[in-house]
């Protein structure tokens, strides 16, 4: 049978794993430091010599064996391989069992070891990498007759280990060429991708009935290349993947270095700027990505991308408590008129001086630090802009545009429900917000719609006050209404 391989690699370049029961061999290539091998052999002790030959020729860093058929009365010395440590999860029933061999120089420890009769055998090992990160390698065998409850039970054990780089090698006896919908849904929920895409078991009498029962599942598929090779160790082909240790994506952080910041020089340059020329030379920009991938579909276009972002954040809004009593009318006298007071230069100076310089910038990219430093020079211009907004009943769209970012609340990092969106407004918008917020509670009592005693809560709703309340007040002024 011809060798099928999706990449220009050879079996010798891979790391191999073997399963004693059926002789399935899977391998992963060494790249930078690591090679892996997976093998399925019915009865490891009977094929240990073949495995040693395989290890000698391929020199894997990690060797995973499923269906080892080992019992506790079989010592490690009977299956030992020179230069390797051995980790075992012996079978609890007639078949099964998982063994993982790792090179002696690797710092490894067992993370999870579990065997459920007639369901699965699972062994998970953590490997410390040179850069202090962790690679988690799992070996798993699931018999064809396993009940339906096997999938959720297995997923529960895997979930805590998928926060870091994770690779699962095994024979799960689901045809991954056409996986059951529930199986695929479970892998998607764990952010795991099957990186073996070609059949690993052929029916010599009927080649069209090829199946893919063997898996290499990982949450970092871009780091691996795969191959499928014929083998005489089993009726399954050898499968393998190359881990490219050189393609580690570096986490890039952006911060301003203020070690040599000269405040006086900054203020001098700021005072000399010709703002009209600056605005005329302003290049067009977009804060949206060029594309999004939604359910394996690439979406482009700013309008469509913004719509998808909005759908993601609003599709599961929190439900209001069912035991919340209805609002009661306020005892305060209703206010039948409302107007915003003009903002003075001293008002702007007061607000800017209280800005937290460590807070992030909004969509304009201007840090609060620079607003605070430049306050004596820009206060007059900002007060003029705020008063112009009040007088014309127009709130600039840039002041309402917030940088919406997902904030992790705790739990599973891969679960979108564990995040909530936060809005970061431009600093200049906070000036108008601070000066208008004292007038908002009294104005909102119009019609006795505000609950008594809730006044202090408005001061805490900074983003909503600025984006919604100010916008509605200005819109009302435009319609010639007194709100």
Image: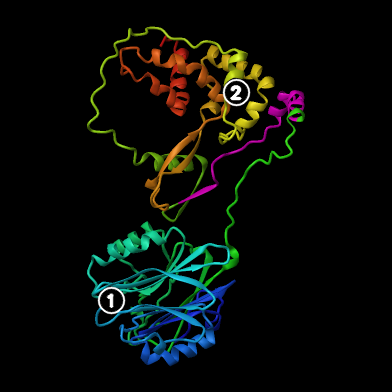
233 with respect to 365 (left or right): left
Residue ID for mark 2? 352
Callout count: 2
Q: Is residue 288 magenta?
A: yes
- Image quadrant where one finds the N terminus: bottom left
Q: Of marks 2 and 1, which one's residue comes earlier in the chain? A: 1
Residue 114 in view: yes
Q: Is residue 417 magenta?
A: no
Residue ID for mark 1? 143
Magenta stretch in the rendered image: 266-293
Label 2, label 1: how many angstroms apart (C-alpha)?
67 Å
Q: Residue at 71% of width from left, 24% of height from top?
A: 275
Camera-nearest residue between 280 and 82: 82
x, y (%) of residue 141?
33, 75
Q: Residue at 56% of width from left, 76% of height from top?
A: 8
Camera-nearest residue between 279 and 403: 403
x, y (%) of residue 53?
49, 90
| Position above or below: 370 against 91 | above
């Amino acid at each position: 049978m011809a060798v099928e391989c999706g990449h220009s690699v050879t079996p010798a370049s891979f790391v191999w794993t073997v399963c004693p029961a059926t002789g399935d061999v899977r391998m992963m290539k060494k790249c930078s430091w690591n090679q892996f091998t997976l093998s399925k052999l019915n009865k490891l002790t009977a094929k240990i010599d073949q495995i040693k030959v395989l290890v000698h020729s391929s020199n894997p860093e990690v060797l995973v064996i499923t269906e080892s058929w080992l019992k506790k009365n079989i010592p490690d010395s009977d299956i030992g391989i020179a230069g390797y440590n051995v980790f075992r999860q012996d079978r609890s029933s007639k078949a099964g069992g998982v063994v993982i061999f790792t090179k002696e120089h690797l710092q490894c420890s067992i993370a999870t070891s579990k065997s459920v009769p007639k369901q699965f055998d699972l062994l998970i090992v953590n490997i410390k990498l040179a850069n202090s990160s962790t690679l988690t390698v799992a070996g798993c065998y699931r018999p064809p007759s396993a009940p339906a409850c096997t999938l959720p039970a297995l997923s529960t054990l895997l979930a805590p280990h998928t926060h870091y780089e994770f690779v699962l090698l095994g024979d799960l006896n689901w045809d991954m060429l056409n996986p059951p919908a529930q199986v695929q849904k479970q892998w998607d929920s764990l952010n795991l991708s099957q990186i073996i895409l070609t059949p690993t078991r052929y029916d010599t009498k009927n080649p069209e009935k090829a199946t893919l029962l063997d898996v290499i599942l990982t949450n970092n598929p871009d780091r691996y290349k795969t191959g499928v090779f014929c083998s005489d160790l089993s009726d399954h082909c050898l499968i393998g993947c190359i881990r490219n240790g050189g393609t580690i994506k570096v986490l890039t952080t952006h911060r301003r270095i203020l070690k040599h910041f000269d405040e006086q020089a900054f203020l001098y340059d700021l005072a000399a700027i010709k703002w009209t020329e600056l605005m005329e030379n302003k290049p067009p920009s977009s804060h949206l990505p060029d594309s999004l991938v939604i359910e394996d579909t690439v979406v482009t276009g700013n309008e469509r991308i913004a719509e998808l972002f909005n759908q993601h954040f609003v599709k599961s809004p929190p439900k209001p408590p069912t035991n919340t009593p209805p609002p009661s009318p306020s005892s305060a006298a209703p206010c039948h008129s409302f107007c915003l007071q003009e903002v003075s230069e001293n008002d702007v100076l007061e607000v800017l001086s209280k800005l937290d310089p460590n807070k992030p910038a909004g969509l304009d990219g201007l840090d609060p630090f620079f607003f605070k430093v430049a306050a004596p020079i820009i206060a007059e211009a900002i007060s003029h802009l705020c008063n112009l907004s009040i007088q014309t009943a127009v709130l600039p769209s840039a002041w309402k545009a917030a940088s919406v970012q997902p904030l992790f609340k705790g739990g599973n990092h891969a679960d979108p429900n564990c995040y909530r969106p936060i809005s970061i407004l431009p600093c200049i918008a906070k000036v108008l917000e601070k000066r208008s917020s004292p007038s908002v509670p009294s104005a909102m009592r119009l019609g006795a719609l505000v609950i008594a005693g809730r006044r202090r809560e408005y001061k805490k709703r900074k983003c909503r006050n600025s984006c919604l309340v100010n916008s509605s007040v200005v819109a009302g002024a435009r319609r010639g209404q007194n709100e």
